[in-house]
Amino acid sequence: MANLMEGKKAQDWINLVLAICLFISPWIIGFVTEASPAWNAWISGIVLGALALAALSAFAEWEEWLNLVVGLWLIVSPWLLGFAASANAMGTHVVLGVLVVAASAWAVWDYRHPHAHA
């Protein structure tokens, strides 16, 4: 059981790193002057970071499902918020969204299949 919890911690650390990357991406990738994608990255980064920190302190499956929803939001937000034409902003959101979805789905799968690690 301790090994299973370590796996979840790794996935939550991954989500925390992705949250930090998302938050700083407007400055690093160069779309800080574009209000919609920049604010989306900042707000989504804060939400993901808060969820990752909460999961690191006390794991709950709902946190991973909420991370998954935020990851899906990141994937579709360039089209819903109208910044799909901005290649840097769109690429950043889609790639980080896919990584968040993958890490969160992995954590949910591990939680629901604890004997798969034996």
Image (spheres, rainbow, N blue to C red):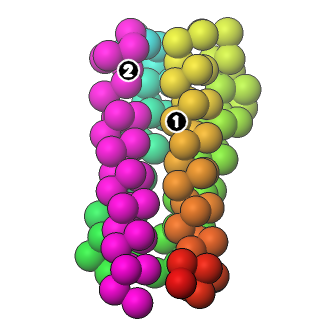
27 drawn magenta = yes
Q: Which is in the foreground here, disc 2 or disc 1?
A: 1
Q: Which mark is residue 69?
A: none
66 drawn magenta = no
Q: Residue 62's x, y, as percent?
A: 54, 76
117 or 99, which is in the foreground?
117
Q: Please tell me which residue is depicted at 40% across the width and 90% down the height of the picture.
A: 1
Task: Give the CA distance from mark 2 to mark 1.
Answer: 13 Å
Secondary structure under badge 2?
Answer: helix
Q: Amino acid at mark 2?
A: Pro
Does the rendering let one see residue 70? no
Q: Please tell me which residue is depicted at 43% across the width and 24% down the height of the picture.
A: 38
Q: Please tell me which residue is depicted at 53% across the width and 48% down the height of the picture.
A: 100
Q: Which mark is residue 26?
A: 2
Q: Amino acid at mark 1?
A: Leu
Tell me if 101 is positioned left or right of 47 in this view.
right
- Dividing the picture into quadrants, the one containing residue 24 is top left
Q: Tell me the chief SS of the magenta region.
A: helix
Tell me if 59 is positioned left or right of 62 in this view.
left
Q: Please tell me which residue is depicted at 61% across the width and 79% down the height of the picture.
A: 116
- Residue 104 lies, with reference to residue 97, above or below; the image says below
* Residues shaded magenta: 1-30
- Residue 92 lies, with reference to residue 34, above or below; the image says below
Pointer 1: what residue? Answer: 96
Q: Residue 110's x, y, as percent?
A: 56, 74
